[in-house]
Amino acid sequence: MAMRRVTRAAIRASCVSSSSSGYFARKFNASSGDSKKIVGVFYKANEYASKNPNFLGCVENALGIRNWLESQGHHYIVTDDKEGPNCELEKHIPDLHVLISTPFHPAYVTAERIKKAKNLQLLLTAGIGSDHIDLQAAAAAGLTVAEVTGSNVVSVAEDELMRILILMRNFVPGYNQVVNGEWNVAGIAYRAYDLEGKTVGTVGAGRIGKLLLQRLKPFGCNLLYHDRLQMGPEMEKETGAKYVESLDEMLPKCDVVVVNTPLTEKTRGMFNKEMIGKMKKGVLIVNNARGAIMDRQAVVEAVESGHIGGYSGDVWDPQPAPKDHPWRYMPNQAMTPHISGTTIDAQLRYAAGTKDMLEKYFKGEDFPAQNYIVKDGELAPQYR
């Protein structure tokens, strides 16, 4: 779908238009002071919801903003039921004003859903990554899309470092031996390595990529990065990483490849059979970015053949991953559900950030500039 950029002329025209459609009307109404219907889509915590008072990112605790919203006269619906024509979310699409979702249990906002959502003004991601939304359709419809930029970058970077070490030291088979009452050192040691001296490359060096490189520096690795923008000299010195302009040039050098790029139409399926074939035999891959950046079957085949020596990540396509998803059953994997960015510390940050944006929305004020993914009919640079 072609993106519609809203110009000042279009805004002026909408002021006198009897239909009052498009971005201006939706943004103007956001500050009208009327009661709003807000829908949040989060994962269920069940018995775990009460185990930690700061466990805010679940259905039961609803980002900790229910009392605040309802005290101001707003209607707040929270659910985990988001798929299919008869799901709970679908019932509220026609008359909601704000939809809040997370990358960990994403509400897929398609062009079809946007078309049905006649009152929708604002799409908020409690966390980072808004690719569960059809951003082109959102831009064309005049919607604002925003996320809590920076809220869980430390959480994800730490998780990536953990996964690199888990793969490098062949940790999972050792853990399984203990659980299964076994003891076979050779079955672990034959493919366990030190991280020191290895070449680690990150595909993408934004906030998370930079934090990962900083954390890897003390391990004595050879650090490389590929990104659309080169870091400044001071940051390159701080991280100790070298810029490689060509991804085709970087990949064959890496013992470990970490995916840190957003999911866009350009990066969807980017790591296909051909791209994986350019990597070293036995390469370790960590992907906490988005599952759809990888060609699902190409990953399975490369892991089974040994071309990929180990694969770890917490992102799947779709999410939640179905029980028959092949990544669950491929060898030498250290996969988990999507957890890296939803630590308790991260939840506190993205809950606070979501509340802050809602407050600004009710007052008709702008959000922090870095939080916008779609504004005035235009996508943020990383999604163009």
Image (spheres, rainbow, N blue to C red):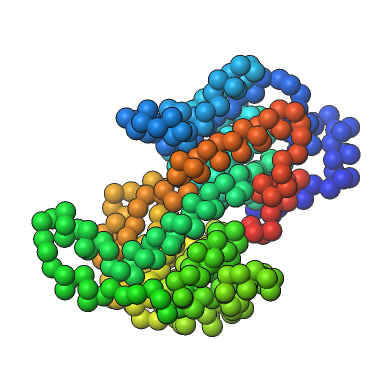
185 to the left or right of 358: left
Residue 209 position within the rendered picture, expressed as x and y whole percent measured from the top left: 55, 63
Residue 166 position within the rendered picture, expressed as x and y whole percent measured from the top left: 33, 63
In this rendering, does residue 127 appear at all? yes
155 to the left or right of 228: left
Say if 297 sits above or below 248 in the image.
above
Residue 18 position within the rendered picture, expressed as x and y whole percent measured from the top left: 83, 29
Give the residue displayed 79% in from the left and 47% down from the top: 6
Give the residue displayed 66% in from the left and 36% down from the top: 357
Q: Give the number of marks.
A: 0
Give the residue displayed 54% in from the left and 45% down from the top: 127
Q: Quadrant of the C terminus?
A: bottom right
Say if 213 sits above or below 47 in the image.
below
Give the residue displayed 50% in from the left and 40% down from the top: 347
In depth, the one of 338 and 222 nearer the eye is 222
In this rendering, does residue 251 appear at all? no
Question: Can you name the residue that lies furthest to the front here?
Answer: 218
Where is residue 82, by image quadrant?
Answer: top left
17 to the left or right of 372: right
Say if 27 sits above or below 180 in the image.
above
In depth, the one of 235 and 272 nearer the eye is 235
